[in-house]
Every structure is written in C-alpha cells, then in structure tokens.
Image: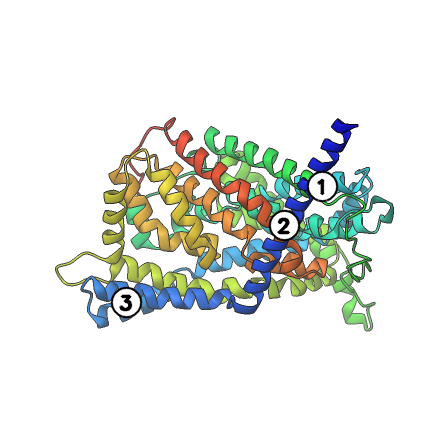
Amino acid sequence: MKELSHQQDMAVAADHDARGLERMAAAIARWSERWFPDAYLFAAIAVVLVAIGALAVGAPVQRVGIAFGDGFWSLIPFTMQMAIVAIAGYVVAVSPPAARLIAWLARLPSNGRAAVAFVALVSIALSLFNWAISLIFSGLLVRALARRTELRMDYRAAGAAAYLGMGATWALGLSSSASQLQANPDSLPKALLAITGVIPFTETIFLPQSMLMVGALTAVSLLIAYLSAPSEARAKTAQSLGISLDETAIDVAAPSRPGDWLEHSPLITLLIVALGSVWAWHEFTTKNPLLAISNLNTYNFVFLLGGMLLNWRPRRFLNAVAKSVPSVAGVLIQFPLYGGIAYMLTKAAAPTGLPLSDHLSHFFVTVSSHGSFPALMGIYSAILGFFVPSGGGKWIIEAPYVIAAARDLQVHLGWAVTVYNSAEALPNLINPFWMLPLLGVLGLRARDVVGFTFTQFVVHLPLVIFMLWILAGTLTYHPPVTL
C-alpha cells in the first residue's frame, strides 16, 4: 500500500510539474501576442542596426545608402524561388489525392497520445522534403484525426506536433534555404559567393553527421510529443475548444459558359505535365539525381508539375494557388530588406577600411576556437533567429561573417551551414511567425500550442548545441569551391 501511495504521489507531482510548464509557456505566448511586433519590423530594425554598425566602423553615409539600394533587389530570384516553395507545397497538400491519403492515415492511430506522436512523425518526415507541405498536410491530418471523437486526442498537443517539422528538422532537409542557396551559385549575391564559394548538398544535408542529427531529433521529438500529450481525462478536444471541423475544401464552381470548359478539362494539365516530364527525365538521367534536386529551380518545377497533376483540372489548381498566396506575403516584403542588409554588411566601408562583415568575423575568431566555434555560433544563430525568423534571409545576413570565421578557424564549411540550419530551426518552436499558416488551418492561436512547443524547445536546445560541438570534431576542413 505504501508503494502504491508513493507511486500515486509521484504521478501527482509529475502532473503538477507538467501543468506548471504549460502555464509558463502560455504566459510567454500571451506576452508575445501582446508585445511581439510583426516579423517585418524585426527585419526593418535589423536594417537600421546594420546601417548604424556600418557607420560605426567608418563607412560614409553615402556608401551605406548606396549599398542598401544596390542590395535591395539582389535576392529577387531567391525570393521568387522561396515563394514558389510555399505555393507548390500548399497546392500539393490540398489536392484530392492528398485528401484521400490523409483520411486513410487518420484511421491508423489507436488512441489520443499515439495520434499526437503519429502527427509528429508525419510532420518531421514531410519537412525533410518540403516545409510547406509539412505544415499544411500535417494540419489537415490533425483535423481528420480530431473528427475521430473516440480517440480523445488533445487538439492543442496535436497542433504542436504538426509544427515539429518546422521546429526541428526542416532546415536539415531538401528545402533548407541556406543549403539551397549555397548549392546554387546563381541564387547567391555575388558579394556573398566570393566569400562562401559553392557548398553542395553532399557537404551539408547529406553529410552522415547531418543525417545523424536528423535521426536524433526525430527520436527525441516523438518521445516528447507522446509523453507531453495530456491523457484522455485531461485532453482538450477540438469540440471542447469550440473549433469547427468542417471539411477544408477548394471550391470549384461549375462551368457557366462554353468558354469555361478548358478550365474544367484535364487536357491542358496533362499536356503541360507531359512536356515538363520530358525535361525532368532528361535532368535526372543526365545528372546525379542528388545534384539535380539540389537545384532550387528543378525542385520547384517538379513540385509544381505534381501540384498541377494532383489537382487535375486547371480551375482547381488556380483556386489552390490563390488560397496559398497570402502565406508568402512575409517572404515577398522581407527578403528585399535582407538583400539590402547583406550588401551593407559586405560592401559599405570606409575608403581604406573593412566592411562590417569583416569586423564581425574577426570578433568571432577572437572569442572562439576551432573546437568552440560550432557551439558558439549555434547559440548565436538561435538567438538571432528569434528576432529574424527567416531561414534564407537570415543566412544572407550571417553567411558573410560566419563562413569567413569558419575559414579562419579551419572549420568544415558544410558543417558551418549545418550549424546554422540546426540552430535556426530552434526559435521556430517559440516564435509564432511560421506557425501562422498552420494555425489558420487548425483554427487555433499561438498561445494554444506554445505550451507544447516550448517543452520541445527546452530539450532540443542543449541536445542540438551538444551535437553540433561533438560532431564537428569528426570533420576535416576543405577550402571553399569558387567559380
């Protein structure tokens, strides 16, 4: 009896601790919702701070202004590429075949906690291919699971699990902005390419050490998702939260005039897909497939063809595209600012002085060593990522001095990108910026899910920093490849 009583006391204590952690995370979310400005303002503030920094190291006002203007449009190709990543991912995720797949997957879990862990697995797996598909598909899966009222699944915990791909592994997968940038010289500003050189996927996301990190983060994330999900007695279902679970459909009106028939016929879709498939077949059979898919244009082309085919009729495809466009507003308006920041970092200097990027590089070389650099840069990148929630845009800001410092300290350059990728995903777990598309699908607020994502963050942070440090010792430095 004493042993049973002791076990009950421990269970009550553990339950109290879990409730306390959830209350703390909810308080942080409430504070963020009230005081945290839009992510655009953080990019704008970064422009001002970098300009002040360039002036502080001796750059004339005229050079700083010219550098900002010259760099403002330097990321237009990459801005368009990242917008298409989001649009293509959304279009694929809401297609009819994807809807049928979601309905089938929703029948697999046997209880609420298993359902939460299952959502986490799907989110993480999909994030390695496309972060946008991961967000939308996982959100739709949560809604399908929530319709199974017998599961008693906590809708908030499942929503947080659907976000784990974005908060844990996306930056270590194929849609990693930094890895895509470094593998595609045409997407990099010339000033940055001269510093970093070309770093192919084989030196970043396909490094065995990077894949080991993916495996470790996946295992830990699934375990936390399962254990932190409230029991059936404490679960808050979608119904108890007052959330409607009506089907999310792409409306397609019936043709109203003879000229509409092509919009509702798959003929044009099939012809375009057939034509594009000829090019894709040539691309993947004449090149190493891993190198072919690392080209962001090829990656987006394949996904767009898939979206056309899966939606079948042009009108449905166009309606899906129209629904996806609001999710890329932040990318379209913020990336030009990041381009201006990159140029101010690398080009604005006194006639006989060094640009701000060189001063920052020298600082990190001074305060770190070959061994400590990965951990130090990981912590720094995670902190900066909370204020600048943009994988590609933030890499443009950091890359000039991160890669320069890595070269000086003889740190593997591909691992420097992985350090950035791994650490950059961490603040997504507590910053609501990238949650917005998912929250729109779920009908939740950031405060509803942050209690669970914060739990993941507490465990992920030390694990990621430790692995970045310990695995760096297994790699050898190679000079950058320049064109």
Spot occupied by residue 107 in the image (x, y as percentages of width and height):
83, 41
Q: Are marks 1 and 2 in contact (CB under 8 Å)?
A: no
Badge 1 local density, few (<14 within 10 Å), some, or many (20+)?
A: few
- The residue lying toward the viewer, choosing from 115 and 230, is 230
Farthest residue in the front direction? Answer: 2
In the picture, the quarter occupied by the C terminus is top left
Spot occupied by residue 240 in the image (x, y as percentages of width and height):
81, 58
At a point 73% along the width and 63% down the height, the residue shown is 315
Badge 2 local density, few (<14 within 10 Å), some, or many (20+)?
A: few
Q: Estimate the spatial distance between the alpha carbons at disc 1 and disc 2, rounded to whole Å.
A: 12 Å
Type of the residue with mark 1: Val
Type of the residue with mark 2: Gly
**Taking the image as drawn, is residue 419 in sight?**
yes
Q: Are marks 2 and 3 in contact (CB under 8 Å)?
A: no
Q: Which residue is mark 1?
A: 12
- Mark 1 vs mark 2: which is more N-terminal? 1
- Mark 1 vs mark 3: which is more N-terminal? 1
Q: Is residue 461 above or below residue 336?
A: above
Type of the residue with mark 3: Ile
Q: Tag 1, which secondary structure? A: helix
Horizontally, residue 202 falls left or right of residue 301, namely left
Q: Tag 2, which secondary structure? A: helix
Q: Which residue is mark 3?
A: 52
In the picture, the quarter occupied by the N terminus is top right
- Mark 2 vs mark 3: which is more N-terminal? 2
Badge 3 local density, few (<14 within 10 Å), some, or many (20+)?
A: some
Tell me the mark number nearer the camera, choosing from 2 and 3.
2
